[in-house]
Image (spheres, helix red, strand yellow):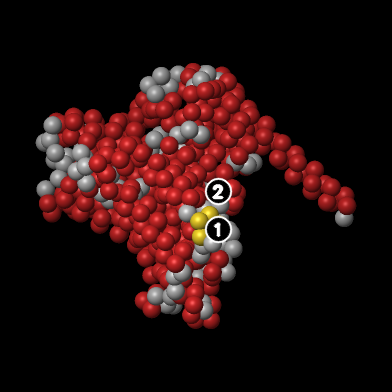
Amino acid sequence: MTASTAGTGRSVDIKHFFHIAVFLAITFLFGRLEPIPPITPYGMNVLGALIGVVYAWIFIDVIWPSMIGLLAIGLLDIMPINTLFNKGFGDPTVVMMVFIFVFSAVLDAHGVTRWISMWFVSRKCVEGRPWLLTFALLLAIAVLGGLSSATPACVIGWSLMYGMFKFCGYERHEGYPMMMVIGAVFASQLGMSLIPFKSLPLVAISAYESLSGATVNYAIYMFASFLSCILCLLVFILVGKFLLRPDLSKLVKLDIKTLIREDERKLSGVQKLLFAFLAALVVFMMLPGFLPKDLAIAVFFKKIGNTGICVLLVALLTAIRVNGKSLCPWRTMVNEGVAWPIIFILAFVLPLSGPIADPRSGITAFMLDILNPLFGTGSNITFLVCIGIVGVILTQFINNTAISVALMPVVFSYCTANGMLAEQPVILVTVACCLAFLTPAASSTAAMLHGNEWVTTRAIWKTAPLLVVSALSVVTAVVILTGTIFL
């Protein structure tokens, strides 16, 4: 028994050290391999750092390999170390994530997320209908992603889901929680594409309009993006129901009346105040897009940005005292609320987005050289299909906003040469670039997903590729249908 245990322990140690050796070899030695043109030696170092750390995230751990990866970026001359840490831990997205996590922890500590979860599962229309509940939750996250952005929508969505999981008795790595954690990222990324004057769509459409001098029809864009979002969420439900098939018995058999006391169904004064803060978070993030640019309040919120809005609200929560205690006891909320693996993944991935897209690395040129033959000289529909495939592949490895902008000259050239109206390819590229959640380098929400403790890496790689392919197929069909009806 002892020998067996010792043998098992020795086997585990050997396997662990083997993975560490592979991680270090890929990270520091990959760049010494002969580059494949147009990838440069600089690009090989970038790929080595990225591939090595992703390997470590899968087989070893998240936090300490991320630290080694950050040091490798400096040691391999990919980026000066001071610039690296400024772009990593100092990136506005990383800072915003810390404060969003604290904000969500405050909501959870005061029972707001539990109350919202109870409200969802106690609706008459979803009683005994867990798939309808699932759809309603994901649709809410998608709309929130459209009104604010994908990252806060995902974190808030997860916060609500965690409350529901605990309320229903689900544990980590069970089928339904893993499906929903992935689904929240899927929904928030789809939601980011909904509104053409927010986030990535604004940058992508503006890039095309500056190239062409023409304008894209926003009404057509919103019709296609909203229809695509609804249909993609329905496809997610079908994938869950017929392929993933998680155990929903805890939701179906849930008798809400036996679990919720009457007094728990009413919000306390503190909870109402926190609801107001949650509404303020969403409203403040979307206000600059609706108000006149020269209005004082719009200028204020635009200057501080989404990160500043999160800092402002958390500061107010920390300052407000109820019964002599802060609504947000900072140290406690940081300790309980901040998911440090996600922070370290973001701090590593975000600085690398620049070097990956940098012409000096040759990585983008290499990927385009491989994918260019897909364009061919076929019909407009062939071009649509190909540009969507290129967009969704590239955005899994390179910053999605950068890819959406980089593909607009291709769209402009093709549309000009073939007399094709721009709305179809512009919509497809924009939404395709929002489907960035397969690899940790794809987007901040993807990095968060790969660091989430409720889901396994295996579950992500089992589900995410299917969702990406299904969603791209749906969006392509919707874009073609939109062109047939309106263009």
Secondary structure of the residue carrying tag 2 is helix
Crowd band around label 1 with a 10 angstrom C-alpha radius: few (<14), some (14–19), many (20+)? few
Query: Which residue, as the protein is rendered here, is positioned at the far front?
Result: 324
Give the side of residue 336 with respect to residue 281, left or right: right
User: Element at badge 1?
Assistant: loop
Q: Nearer the viewer, mark 1 or mark 2?
A: 1
Residue 470 can be seen, yes or no: no
Q: Residues within 10 Å of mark 2 (few under 14, many from 20)?
A: some
Q: Residue at x 56, y 66 (%)?
A: 166
At which x and y percent is residue 158? 47, 56
Q: Amino acid at mark 1?
A: Gly
- Give me the disc on residue 330: 2
Q: Is residue 173 left or right of residue 276?
A: right
Spot occupied by residue 227 in the image (x, y as percentages of width and height): 25, 57
**Closer to the camera in the image, 152 or 394:** 152
Residue at the extreme right: 2
Instruction: Answer whether residue 213 is visible to the viewer in this image.
Output: yes
Q: Quadrant of residue 68?
A: top right
The amino acid beneath tag 2 is: Trp
- Horizontal and vertical percent for residue 391? 33, 39
**Residue 95, relative to residue 457: is it above or below?**
above
Task: Please give the label number shown on residue 282.
Answer: none
Residue 212 pos. (x, y %) = 15, 31
> Which is nearer the eye, 360 or 320?
320
Mark nearer the N terminus (1 vs 2): 1
| Real-space CA distance between mark 1 and mark 2, rounded to the nearest whole angstrom | 15 Å
- The residue carrying mark 1 is 324
Relative to 143, 60 lies left or right: right
Quarter of the image where the N terminus is located: bottom right
